[in-house]
Image (tube, rainbow, N blue to C red):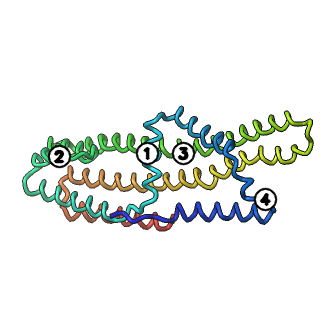
Amino acid sequence: MKRPDLAIPLGAAVGLAAICIGAWMEGVRLGFLWQPAAALIVFGGTLGAVLIRRGLAGVGAILRGVFSLFFDPGKDEIEATKARLTWLARLERREGAQALEAQAAATNDPLISHALMLISQYAEPKLVRERLERILDHEDEQGLRDVTTLEGAASYAPTFGIVGAVLGLIQVLRALADPTQLGVGIATAFVATIYGVGVANLILFPLAARMRERHNNFMRQREAVAEALIDLAAHETPSAITRKFVAEMELMLRKEKAFL
């Protein structure tokens, strides 16, 4: 079972608290920072831009990716993959390569399924590597699309904050006949800028960086699986395949800990 990772909500809470306390120390009433119109312009505009860029399916993929960041992937999946690779290597050693054809049809993982089908047809390890590298390139491209879209949203938000500020200033200019309202009007206009810059630098850019690191770790794991399948095509022993996979996973986990 995946354990919840509290770093994201804790970091967001610390950052938001720091902003609010700093504003209070500067004499700004916290209630003044709540401007629904500014929030609608910034968040609605940013969401609209992302929808244009990726569509509903893309937004759904990003939300699923962000939701997964709230949970520690742990070692359970790695252990399950190691056990599966060991079992496949023993099956191939015991019953021959053709026994892997049924396993290829039974798995939903395109990387493993494609490799097992090729191995069952006695394909050369070089051909298996070429086919698996194509699948890995596709998975890498798909994963990075979500990261770059989230980074794009982080760049859109401050721009919509400026839009909100300009719209507020337009309203201020319409009230030039009442100088007593100018100060409050200008201050209100710039709240939208705070929303845009704040959500970009406190939420969106950090989430994109964390998602990129998670994706890089996932791709390293997939590359280790691909190398194990190539070794299976070369008829390496089960112990050698498992030992190489475990070494790659331990290296990945050390890098992840160093990042965190």
Quarter of the view holding residue 50: top right
Write down the residue under mark 4: 28
Give whichever of discs 3 and 2 has the lower sequence position: 2
Q: Are marks 3 and 2 in contact (CB under 8 Å)?
A: no
Q: Are marks 3 and 1 in contact (CB under 8 Å)?
A: no
Q: Are marks 2 and 1 in contact (CB under 8 Å)?
A: no
Is label 1 in a helix, a strand or a loop? helix
Write down the residue under mark 3: 150
Q: Residue at x 59, y 53 (%)?
A: 203
Is label 3 in a helix, a strand or a loop? helix
Judged left or right of residue 168, residue 84 is left
Give whichever of discs 1 and 4 has the lower sequence position: 4
Q: Amino acid at mark 4?
A: Val
Q: Residues within 10 Å of mark 2 (few under 14, many from 20)?
A: few
- The residue closer to the viewer here, 155 or 134, is 155
Mark 3 to mark 1 CA distance (whole Å): 11 Å
Mark 2 to mark 1 CA distance (whole Å): 25 Å
Residue depth check, mark 3 versus mark 2: number of the one nearer the observer: 3
Mark 3 to mark 2 CA distance (whole Å): 35 Å
Is label 4 in a helix, a strand or a loop? loop
Q: Residues within 10 Å of mark 4 (few under 14, many from 20)?
A: few
Q: Are marks 3 and 4 in contact (CB under 8 Å)?
A: no
Q: Amino acid at mark 1?
A: Gly
Is label 2 in a helix, a strand or a loop? helix
Residue depth check, mark 1 versus mark 4: number of the one nearer the observer: 4
Residue 106 circle label? 2
Q: Residue at x 69, y 51 (%)?
A: 34
Residue 143 circle label? 1
